[in-house]
Amino acid sequence: MAERLLLESMAAVDGSLKRWWTECDGLRARDAFTATGVMGAYRRILPADALRDATTSVYAEIAHRLGWLELDRALPETEFQQLSTDISGWVTQDRALSEVFETFGAPSLRIGGTNSFYPKTLAYTTAEPDHDLICFHLWNAFANTEPGTELQGVHTEPVVLAVRHRPDRFTASFSFTPEGLRRRPTSDQGSPLRSTVWIFHGDHARYASGVFDTLDAGLAWAAERKVTGILAEYACGGAYDVAVSEGRFTPSKTHHGTADHVAAFGPGLRHIHLTGGLRD
């Protein structure tokens, strides 16, 4: 509410109320604004303690288009386009805060504090107002420790859960890391990636030989049977279709989406190599 009141007041002073109202209508049109605002839309994407900074990034993007956002660093056009191209593939594995800086440099905008135990959002864009923000949503929290012991985080530093980088309907505008998929709110059971199974495929085997509800169940079976192969996590549904819908794979070549490509497509989620029933 604070961002909305502030920006609407600025729009009135700036003579930009119609543009501001158009931006608000655009949020609703792409389901980025629910009955509980932008934060309500993010509740389907991120853990509850990461909503504040993520919500702010949406209003920062509007401020950028209206020419009000002061950037810490404006990316050159070529660097921004390269980031836009690479990001879908970059988040197919788990990433930490330090990797974001090492790969993409200092952000255009940092939302949230510097404490490594708390969530934060990093945004990248150019000085051109027409360019959207590419927003990295990172998460961490205090781990459960014994009383009197030193505070520790769930992770040693914040990790990337999702990147908002597509001008699509809100839920389709994100790409998720594996950790981001695991941390999606449990209320989002309608998402195909909230229901997964673990499938074992033996080395040199033509068919899978085991399906398990949980990783622990699969590992226990593999240890008992001393099997060698891969135990992989699969979302319910077609692996290719789910990966595209969740932003983990973006078709970019002529053979992508063909029958042969879909039939051979891997799950893109977690997998574990086993030798003699033990982790390799």
Image (tube, rainbow, N blue to C red):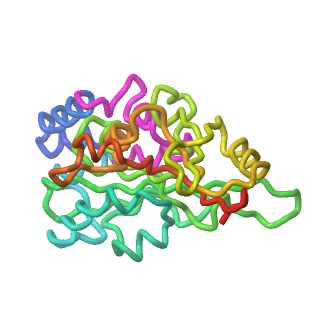
Residue at the (38%, 38%) spot, across then down: 242
Relative placement, left or right, of 216 versus 272 is right
In the image, the segment drawn in magenta is 29-57
Instruction: Give above or below for 34 relative to 265.
Output: above
Q: Position of residue 210 (x, y in %)?
A: 62, 40
Instruction: Name the one closer to the observer, 122 or 67.
Output: 122
Relative placement, left or right, of 280 versus 88 is right
Q: Dividing the image into 4 quarters, which one contains the N terminus?
A: top left
Q: Is residue 112 visible?
A: yes
Residue at the (59%, 65%) spot, across then down: 116
Residue at the (50%, 30%) spot, across then down: 188
Instruction: Name the one closer to the observer, 185 or 8.
Output: 185
Q: For residue 35: magenta?
A: yes
Residue at the (25%, 58%) spot, across then down: 69
Instruction: Give above or below for 249 relative to 94.
Output: above
Picture mark count: 0
Residue extending furthest toward the top: 35
Which quarter of the figure has residue 16? top left
Instruction: Name the one closer to the observer, 162 or 39.
Output: 162
Q: Position of residue 68 (x, y in %)?
A: 21, 55
Q: Position of residue 74 (x, y in %)?
A: 23, 70
Q: Is residue 5 visible?
A: no
